[in-house]
Image (spheres, grey):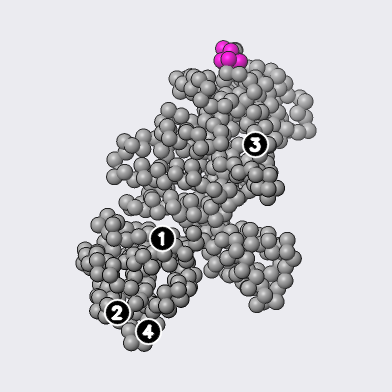
Amino acid sequence: MSFQEELLLLLRARYPVIYIATLEEERVEQAIAACTKPLNNRSVYVWDFVDGYQGNPNDAGVARRNPLQALEHIEKLPESVAALFVLRDYHRFLEDVAISRKLRNLARRLKSQAKNILLLAPQVQIPDDLAETVTVLEFALPGVEDIHAEVTRLLSSLNVQLSPSDLDALVQSCQGLSIERIRRVLARGIAAHGTFRPDDIDLVLEEKRQTIRQTQILDFYPAKEQISEIGGLDNLKDWLLRRGNSFSEKARQYGLPYPRGLLLVGIQGTGKSLTAKAIAHHWHLPLLRLDVGRLFAGLIGESESRTRQMVQLSEALAPCILWIDEIDKAFAGVDGRGDSGTSSRVFGTFITWMAEKTSPVFVVATANNIQSLPPELLRRGRFDEIFFVGLPTQEERKAIYEVHLSRLRAHNLQSYDLDRLAYETPNFSGAEIEQAIVEAMHIGFSQDRDFTTEDILEAASQIVPLARTAQEQVDALQAWAASGKARLASRSSLSDRLKQRMGPD
């Protein structure tokens, strides 16, 4: 059901107070105006704090800088008058006891009248005492059809013509932007060159980054890492490669649903975050990183609003990758937190969206402590697959050394004894292997020579791997994976890994 259809249904059902969350004030007011025609051209009264009521000459300036008077003005109108009252930014006044009481009193009266109050606000902030009075309706960012119509109109008005393929690319790149931002970015390209060129689509990407930065929830993360840079994890890489074209139109025609997501569980430093970046690069999709900690920052009620904003924005930018790093820290013990149930509500909203979403948003979540995750998150239907990323085996360590040294010393890779390095660094994670190489480079650089295999081994001897310092956690993760609750990211069995853990120190 579209926004206009849903709003029209609520108006006809005489819902007295409707709260519309949107940043696009101009576009939502146009949609409200369009709903008046099926309602016999019902009058629309618009109020804001600075100018009061506007549009109707008889009411011009009424209730200027007086939000309580704005409600009293509605009360004074005859019962026979059918009208919509659009109150801009009214969420700022709802905590006032007089306004809250007046709004509830009005809601009772308006149930029997052809009048509706529409509260416009950029985000949902509703006091508890108004929860039963107010109905929330979200106004989504423009869809593909809306963007196509607006872009076509703007380009035609400027006598700019793009090929069908360039126009489709521009429309797709504009997904996730408001109409106002789309107009702004097109104007920016025209101002720079006197016309809008296909290569100006990069400006849209910059505007999109700016939009995401302003949310302070999502980060537009540049993904340059390739799957070939991941050492080992062959099962996981095969799984990802098979789904490389799953977001294409050809896959839809075949009948494939969009991939839902992936949960990577394992020890720190084993390549989980690197995998998330490599997925986005290989699938040619934008990577959005969710800072879950920011969801719980701020006032009561803002967390739920920010969660809805995150969902709306990621779906508008779809197809995309939504990367949630260390999800276990965000939702650990959600039932026991003393935050008035905010964590539970945010978690509930999040997992419900994951289970019901039909948009091409691929969620990649990473976790280090599986025991702290709520069981609901691990249930089938949230993620397509749960992979366990354990400590690399000897062969995988050799591959990791080869990846790093090929990048750093491609000209003399053969001078390094990869087999010996892999054999003598048991229980090392990928991050610890990289740390050993960096330290070896410092050794060589300080002596004005290139670093050697011996330097790497010397550096490794000074590193105490996490597998020792957090042995209980590592053993618990291994036991959890061995019980069959997750798929192994590597082809080697857990028994092989446990044997290798008994290797040389």
The residue tagged 2 is 80
The answer to whether mark 3 and mark 4 are in CB contact below 8 A is no
- Of discs 2 and 3, which sits in the foreground? 2
Distance, label 1 to label 2, CA atoms, is 26 Å
Q: Earlier in the sequence, mark 1 or mark 3?
A: 1
Label 1 crowd (10 A; few <14 / some 14-19 / many >=20): some
Q: Nearer the viewer, mark 2 or mark 4?
A: 2
Mark 4 Cα-neighbour bin, 10 Å: few <14, some 14–19, many ≥20:
few
Could you tell me which secondary element the residue under label 1 belongs to? strand
Left or right, residue 181 beside residue 441:
left
Find out whether the residues at labels 2 and 4 contact each other: C-beta distance under 8 Å: no
Question: Does dot 4 land on a helix, a strand or a loop?
Answer: loop
Q: Which residues are magenta?
A: 495-502
Task: Left or right? Give the position of 491 relative to 88.
Answer: right
Residue at the image point whose x is 38% and y is 50% from the top: 303
Q: Which residue is mark 3?
A: 240
The label shown at residue 137 is 1
Amino acid under label 3? Leu
Instruction: Look at the magenta stretch and give its main secondary structure.
Output: helix
